[in-house]
Amino acid sequence: MRDAQPGNIYLKDYEVPRFLIDKTELRVEIGDKDATVLANLTMRRNPASNYQGKSLSLHGVQLELQQLAVDGRALSKAEYEVNGEELLIHRVPDNFTLTSEVLIRPRENTSLEGLFKSRTMYCTQCEAQGFRKITYYLDRPDVMSEFTTTVVASKSECPVLLSNGNLHDWGALDDGRHWATWHDPFLKPAYLFALVAGDLSLVEDSFTTCSGRDVALKLYVEEKDIEKCGHAMDSLKNAMVWDEEVYGREYDLDLYMIVAVDDFNMGAMENKGLNIFNTSCVLAHPSTTTDDGFKRVEAVVAHEYFHNWSGNRVTCRDWFQLSLKEGFTVFRDSQFSADMGSATVKRVEDVNMLRTVQFAEDSGPTAHPVQPAYYMEISNFYTATIYEKGSEVVRMIHTLLGPELFRRGTDIYFERHDGQAVTIEDFVAAMADVSERDFTQFMNWYRQAGTPRLSVTSDYDPQQQQFSLHFSQSCPPTPECQEKQPYHIPVSVGLVTPSGDLPLDAKGNTTQVLEITQPEQTVVFEGITEAPVPSLLRGFSAPVKLSYPYTLDQLSFLMGHDSDGFNRWNAGQQLSIQLMQALVTDYREGTPLVLDQRLVEAFAKVLAETDTDKAMQALVLMLPSEYLLAELAEVIDVEAIHQVRRFMCRELGRELRDTWRATYLANSEKVFEMSGAAVAKRSLKNLSLRYLLNGASDDSLSLMHTQFMEADNMTDRLSALNGLVNDPREEARPLSEQALDKFYNDWQHEPLVLNQWFQTQAACVLPGGLERVKVLMEHPAFDFHNPNKVRSLIGVFCNSNLINFHDEAGEGYRFLADNVIALDKLNPQIASRQLTPLTKWRRYDLTRQALMREELARVLAEPGLSRDTYEIASKSL
Ligand code: TRP
Ligand code: ZN
């Protein structure tokens, strides 16, 4: 255990900053061994603070202080003290300049926070609290400053020197070093600071904004990646146009830079004018990147761009408001992706992720509200709840207000708060003002953790021609809150009959948004001449767990007749889930498994459709994941879930063999294309091939093998590789091993492709998973310091390979704990994230519970544990 246990920080303790920093001038000199940071801060007492004292407290972590001066006078040792992560200066005037010089060690910085080295470059990551690893500062988002940054480094090692804003001046020194000075005219908090120095190549383009200003767009990557920038650049330009058209937001600097780095803790970072991206979220080429990879690049590029308004121009007052920028920005990027491709496909993908990852988080020991009331380590709060549930909450406001009022709300929000650091309440107040609605009850979505349950029943009275829906809502207790207040839930409904949707108002609208606010509430529809099947929560209008006593026949009916595309998909999922849950019970009781023919018929019908989007068809034909079934189970029986899902895939593969083959052939194209239609075809084609393989058709192995050998794109190649690797048949082994070897040999120089090679093997469900992963950890291409590699191998194995990770002997748990302990010494953010699967121990049988707890306890007992890992481990036990 640590000497001093870290404590919680509370939202209720928020205090305005005692001092402000009007100007920040930095000179960062990068040497061969270390770096020095000279900071000149123009500071003054904050008139809004009632602090009367004379002392100044600054944040600083792992800084080696060289000199410290106030108004140019060096301070003696008696005039200040360094206590842990704070520098306390005993006396400062009301207005003054603070000068400090510190030494930092970017080459030894494995946390990837602050200034660090990755391959050929130095770069920074300051969100949330990394700036304090660069210099002593008021490292909090409500202290906004005008930054001028000079970067000095060796000209040969680091020909490119970047920071936020505009390049102001540059020059050479006579010792082989050079320098560049950048100035950012926009006030910003330190978390948006960035600096890059390295050997990078440049791809350039330009954009003319709606008011006619020219913006230079610059993408900096390693020379070898120069061919992989086109998609990110196109996505950036599309995002810039979209934000002008949909939100009226124009870009504000003359320059927009993106730098790609291989070692990065998250996807990307929205630093003002200088985004830094994980290579996996910016580089894309059909030969190395799957279609899903392309979509991800588009979404992340847009997300970071949208932050320029939702996050940078209007930022967060404190980190409890994180979802103010993240939830809103995820909502914006999801609208963008929906507009760029298929809105229904995007919605299905998002809801799938929400239901698996976020719902699981919301029902576990790390559950927290979208606006948390307390935290230990803010890095642990970059979660599915803050991001994805936060986005759902903004989406509900959009649903309640409608697009026009919502847009007026965002206009007012941006206008009122431009240049300010604000709260979630400020955002909601803008929405309340334009709509004259009361959001008091709605705020429960932000303040209460947990996923509400909404149970619905109905009755139909043919005499009165009335159809009634009875709603009942509740929310299970979560660690921070036992008794939940009822939520304000927008429920979008339609009433479906064999002849179509019934009109619900005089205008003939067939969808209506009901507002459920009471624990129990009944809504009556008048003039209903036949008993309809209700289509509830269309488009997934609220992040709740809905239950309605649908029969299997009603679900099949909705699958074929609901006018809401999302709910057609959802009906199919519910149908599969009901059947699979029943089979799980059969499996546990030793009853032989039999597949309900209604599912085969439903699948056959979907496969026969000719006018549906093929991407949507593929999604409907994809069975719910093991992960989702686990999330839904009372007690997770990994083995039963795995066997039942395999059984269903095999039966569907066998029963519809000829149709799968025909669909495979009909959707195979000779020439590669990147269009939406071509992507959709590929997804349906690869799904069909997978069912052929699952059904163990004789020709499936050779079809897979041929596709692997002849593929001219990564989607087809990887899909075939996955199929081969997971095929349990003996005759598949040599083909699978050959394919893995060939894949490695062909792509060994592409780190991003090797990530996929690791992922494929880490996810392989055949027995012996842990041994395979342990062998791969010794592979020369594996790198424990690189988060993408750790996530690809350890993360995928522990999160997605349920059957192997949860092996009864508990070796998987021991493996994860060992790795978390080792990672924690290098990179606490990554270590604590990897710990997640063990935190879910309560969901398993008693034997596994004990094994998982034991490993968690072992992690927690580790001396010198980081605050990050300590928080997650201690909350979980
Ligand atoms: N603000 C970033 C985003 O969502 C998230 C991020 C990037 C981050 N790097 C980080 C958060 C490091 C914490 C630590 O776009
Ligand atoms: Zn973000």
Image: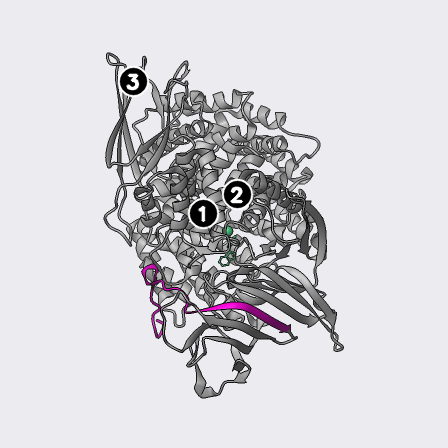
Kind of residue at disc 1: Gly
Q: Which residues are magenta?
A: 1-29
- Disc sitting over residue 839 in the figure: none
Secondary structure beneath label 1: helix
Mark 3 is surrounded, within 10 Å at the Cα level, by few (under 14), some (14 to 19) or many (20 or more) other residues, namely some
Side of 380 where 153 appears, left or right: right
Front residue (pair 159, 274): 274
Find the distance from the CA under tag 2 to the CA under tag 1: 10 Å
Question: Is residue 572 shown in magenta?
Answer: no
Q: CA distance from mark 2 to mark 3?
A: 39 Å
Under tag 2, what secondary structure?
A: helix
Residue 513, compared with residue 223, is above or below; it is: above
Q: Which residue is mark 2?
A: 333
Residue 179 position within the rendered picture, expressed as x and y whole percent measured from the top left:
69, 70
In terms of image quadrants, where is residue 89? bottom left
Which comes before the other along the chain, label 2 or label 1? 1
Q: What residue is pinned by disc 1?
A: 327
Q: Are marks 2 and 3 in contact (CB under 8 Å)?
A: no
| Label number found at residue 526 | 3
Query: Sequence-wise, which precedes: disc 3 or disc 1?
Result: 1
| N-term-proximal mark, 2 vs 3 | 2
What type is the residue that disc 3 sits on?
Answer: Glu
Q: Eyeballing the image, is 309 above or below 830?
A: above
